[in-house]
Amino acid sequence: MSAQPGLFIAFEGGDGAGKSTQVRLLADAVVLAGREVVITRQPGGTPLGQSLRELVLHGDHMSARAEALLFAADKADHVEQVIRPALRVGSVVITDRYVDSSVAYQGAGRDLGADEVQRLQTWAVDGLLPDLTVIVDISADEGRRRRGEVHDRMESEGDDFHEAIRSHFLAMAAAEPERYLVVDGTASVEEIAEQIADRVRELGIDL
Ligand code: TYD
C-alpha cells in the first residue's frame, strides 16, 4: 500500500491493450465521486521524463541495460515530482504504466532477468507500490492488429517479445491477487470499466 492519504492505481498491459481509454474512464468516475485525481503516464510524466521518452522510445538502438536505466530514471523523477506529492495531499493517482512494465519489458522481454529489473525499479521509486494494479490483458497478435502501422522501439519487436511480456504480467498478477486485477482486453469497453469500478469500490472509493 502507498501508506499515504491518497490512493495509487497503475494500469499495465501490452501495447494496444486499450489501457489509456480505461485510465480516462476511471479518472472521470473518480472525479464524479468527488475525489481529486491526477492522471499520469510513463515514460514521460515530467519534463525530464519527456526527454527520456524521446530517447528510449524513438532513439537509435541501445543496449538493454541502458534502456532499463533510462526507464528507471524516468520513474525516479516521476515518483518524486508527481506521484508522491499528489498522494501526500490525498489525491487518487492513476498512472498509465509503472514498475511492472519495466519488469515485464526489460526483465522478461529483453532477458535482463525479472528479479534484477525489479530490484533496480524498486530502488528507483524508493519502494512505492501501487495499491492496485490493473492488467489489461491482450494477446500479442491482437495487440499488433490494433496498433496498426505506428511503431516505436518496443512496438516494432516481434510477437515472441510481446508474448513473453504478456505471460510475465499474468504471472505477477497470479502471484499477488490481492494487489492485481486482470481484465480481458477483448471484452467491451463498458464491461472492462465496470469490472475495474467494482474493484476500486473495494478500496473505499464510492463510484
Ligand atoms: P506508450 O506510447 O506510452 O504506449 P502504451 O499506450 O502502450 O503505454 O509506450 C510506452 C512503451 O514503453 C510501451 O511499449 C512499454 C514500454 N515501457 C517499457 O519498456 N518499460 C517501462 O518501464 C515503461 C514504463 C514502458
Image (spheres, grey):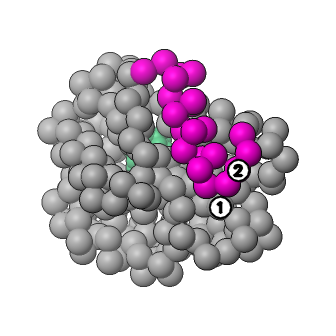
Q: Position of residue 112 (x, y in %)?
A: 19, 66
168 left or right of 15 in image: left
- Amino acid type at image mark 2: Ile
Three-letter residue code for mark 1: Leu
In the picture, measured across the screen, residue 39 lies left or right of residue 61, that is right
The disc at residue 180 is none
Q: Position of residue 11 (x, y in %)?
A: 50, 47
Q: Which residue is mark 2?
A: 205
| Image quadrant where residue 110 sits | bottom left
Camera-nearest residue between 137 and 154: 137
Q: Main secondary structure of the magenta part?
A: helix
Residue at the location (39% across, 72% down)? 121
The extreme right residue here reads 34
Contact (Cβ within 8 Å) of mark 1 with mark 2: yes
Residue at image point 43% right, 46% down:
181
Q: Quadrant of the N terminus?
A: bottom right
User: Residue 171 vs residue 73: left or right?
Assistant: left
Judge whether residue 201 can be spotted in this image. Answer: yes
Magenta range is 187-207
Judging depth in this view, the residue of 171 and 177 nearest the camera is 177
Tell me the number on the disc at residue 7.
1
Q: Is residue 195 above or below residue 94?
A: above
Give me the residue at 50% from left, 81% from top. 126
Is residue 198 located in the magenta-colored stretch of the structure?
yes
Give the position of the C terminus as an image quadrant: top right
> Badge 2: few (under 14), some or many (20 or more) residues near its Cα, within 10 Å?
some
Taking 111 as reference, is 118 above or below it? below
Q: Earlier in the sequence, mark 1 or mark 2?
A: 1
Which residue: 47% across, 78% down?
127
